[in-house]
Structures are given as structure tokens and as C-alpha cells.
Amino acid sequence: MKRLLLCVVVACCSLSFYGESSPDILVGKIRIFIDQAEYLWTQSALERLDDQVISPPIQVETVISFLSIKPGRYTSEEDVASEAEVSQRRLRETGYFYEASIMIIPPKKVLHERTLVINVTTGFLTRFGGGGIWAMYGKVAMGGRRDALYLYAGYNKSGIRYLQSHVGGSPVILGGSLFYVGPGDYPGKSDGQDVENRFAASITTGWAITPDLSIGIEPTVEGFGFSSGGLLSVQPFISQRILVQTGHQSEGGVNLRLFWYPEHTGVKGEGSVYARLGITKRLTFAVKGSGGYSPTKIPEEALFDLYYTEDANVRSGYSQQELRAADYVLASAEVRFTVLETYIPPILNCVVQPFVFVDASQTLSSTKVRDKDFFDAYGLGVRVLLNNPVFAYFTFSYGVNNEGDGRFLFCGTAGY
């Protein structure tokens, strides 16, 4: 009987200790420093504390839009630390800031309450890039908001793209684009397309459900001009990014998109999933799977393009005609190793990252030239990543297939 009573007492003490070691934590307030400006965000209000008149280059609402934690929330100590770390990484990767940090301040009076201190320093808000035979110039965080404007010019691509996220502080996403493609090679190029009908335009509307999850719809017209109305498609989409705390800068993501062609009563769907594991700070393993399917007949110019599409193509010496299909599956893998990370005076971060890759694709109803339905690529490449504050990326690769046919590629991407 004494042993039984002793066990009960020990069990009660253990439960009591467990309950006290993992209590609910209240995020009471968040202090936000943007350069010299100071803000206090509580459950009831958001107010500026400093006496400066000039507004900071980045609005405080823009900083808040990247956070996955807010005042007044009860959660565990571990969740507060995890979400603070994820939010800090998200702020750094926006490219809006030279530095971004989030600290958790221990309590002074109320033991279950925590204060978060966010400190950001406004960065370089001009963007440069390129790919193929075109160059890009852009501005981000215009007016302190999540507005971005990009201008493109080159032999095979010229145009403009605008995107605004969190319109008026809401989760609404709005954007649009207008391009003229050619005369060089470009995605979706088809034989016999008239010079005057190489315009493409789109309008994007969406909703940011969370900082990493968005849905929307994008009406698009391709191949229109002075003598053609082009090909109209309505494209609902969903995009999910997953930041992983395992390894170094690891993450994953899922993207789904449906294409409806009202003038041809045709539909197709396309999706992709990727994962990137930072094994060490220098060594990274990345994989991506993509697939597309059309249950109905679609126009030839609407076929899936595995030749030009960046980060979703077969990087070897097949022809464009071989790599266009009404349905496909594609698997790609890369092993990346950073051999150099340096700073070009005064503050330009430059990373040189060689990689090896393999691509494999299976198509069922491709436009066949060699009567093939399996396509592969094996090769080497190198990326030059100009990170914060410029965020310009350049990828060079050369791959061959099992028949020995090779192809050199240059694109403006940091990879999947």
C-alpha cells in the first residue's frame, strides 16, 4: 500500500512538473525597429514611438506581412522560438533588408508573457538580372510597400511586369505583364508565327492566405498582335512554400496550376514539388518533380514546353519539337557545392556554386521527331549568385543525353 501511494505521489509530481515546464506563452507585444523608426505592435493597436517625422523607406505594415506570429497569441515556448526563426529567415530572403533579426525578450513581471524585438535595416531595392539574350532591371518595395516593377529588354524578350502583394494592407495580390518575344528563340515558339503576333499579356489576382501560401487566378493571352487575337487561357493557381529548419537553409514547395482555353474548350493541368536540403553550409542536395496532363485536345501552341522552361526542362541536346507534349512527367536532381563565397567591394555578396545534374522525362503523346517518349540529360553547371543586396542570378550548364547530343544553357535563375 505504501508503494502504491508513493507511485501516485511521484506520478502527480511528474505531471505537475511537466505542466509547469511547458505552459502556454503569450506573445504580449512586438517592438519593430526599421532603421531609426520604432513601432510598438500590441493586440489592440500599432503605434509609432519615435518622434521623427520622416517615414522609413519600408512601411511597418510591409514588415508585418512577412511574420507568421502576432501579438495576443497563446502558444508554446518552442512554437514562439520556431516561428520567430522562420519569420527572421523570411525577412532576410525578401531582399528588402541588409540585415533582419528577431529576438525574444524574457519576462520582467508577467512570467508567461514574451516580447519580440524585430530589427531591420533597409537594403538595396534595385534589381538586375537576365537570361538567354535579354536583360532585366527592376525596383522592389516601391513606396515602402510590397510593389515590384521589372523592365525587360533583349533580342528575344522585351516587356514589363508589375506585381503588388498585400494591396492596402490586405492579403490581396494584383499584378500584370506585357511582353514582346523574339525574334530569337523563346518559350512557346512555334513555326510560322507572324512577327506582328508575338505579344503576350497577363493579369494576376490572388489572395495571400499565409506568408507562404497563396491562391489566385491569372487570365493570359499569348501570341496576339495586329492580325491575331492570340490564345486565351484562364489559369487558377496555388503556391505553397515550406521553410524547413533541418539542415542549412532547407525548404520545399508545391505549385499547382490549371489552364482553361475557353475558345477551344480544352483544359490542362500542371504541378510541381521540390525539396532542397542543405547538408552543410556548402553542400546542398535538391530535387524537383513536375508533371502535366491534358484530358482534352489542346492547341499545338498550348503544349507543355520542356525545352525552354527554366527549372523544368531537359537540359541536353534534344530539339524543341521533341520536348513539346500534351502530357509529361519530369524528375530532376542536383548536387550543389559552394566553392567560393566572397564580397566584392563594397558590400556585394557573390557565391560561385558548381553543380552536377540529371534530368529524366517521360511523355505519352509528344510531338515526336525521333519516335521517342523518354528523354534524359546528364551534365555539369555553375551558378554565379549575386545575393544581398543585388539579387541577380546566372546559371550556366551543359548536358548530354544517352545518344551523346549536348546543349549549352544560360538562364537567370538560382535553381529550384
Image (spheres, helix red, strand yellow):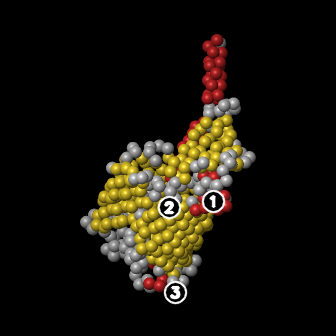
Residue 327 in the image, given as x and y percentages of width and height: 45, 69
Marks 3 and 2, how far apart at CA? 34 Å
**What residue is shown at x 56% (from left), y 54% (from top)?**
212
Residue holding disc 2: 126
Residue 179 in view here: yes
Residue 258 in view here: no
> Which of marks 1 and 3 precedes in the sequence?
1
Residue holding disc 1: 166
Mark 2 or 1: the one toward you: 2
Mark 3 or 2: the one toward you: 2
Residue 291 in the image, given as x and y percentages of width and height: 46, 63
Residue holding disc 3: 226
Considering the numbered disc 3 on the image, is that residue within a helix, a strand or a loop?
Answer: loop
170 and 323: which one is in front? 170
Marks 3 and 1, how far apart at CA? 35 Å
Residue 390 in the image, given as x and y percentages of width and height: 46, 58
Asked whether disc 3 touches disc 2, contact meaning CB atoms under 8 Å apart, the reply is no
Considering the numbered disc 2 on the image, is that residue within a helix, a strand or a loop?
Answer: strand
**What residue is shown at x 60% (from left), y 52% (from top)?**
63
65 is higher (above) or lower (below) than 74? below
84 is higher (above) or lower (below) than 110? below
Disc 2 residue type? Thr
Disc 1 residue type? His
**What residue is shown at x 64% (from left), y 62% (from top)?**
167
> Which of marks 1 and 2 precedes in the sequence?
2
Crowd around label 3: few <14 · some 14–19 · many ≥20 (10 Å)? few
> Which of marks 2 and 3 precedes in the sequence?
2
Residue at the far right: name it. 44
Marks 2 and 1, how far apart at CA? 20 Å
- Residue 406 as seen in the image, left or right of residue 26: left
Disc 3 residue type? Phe
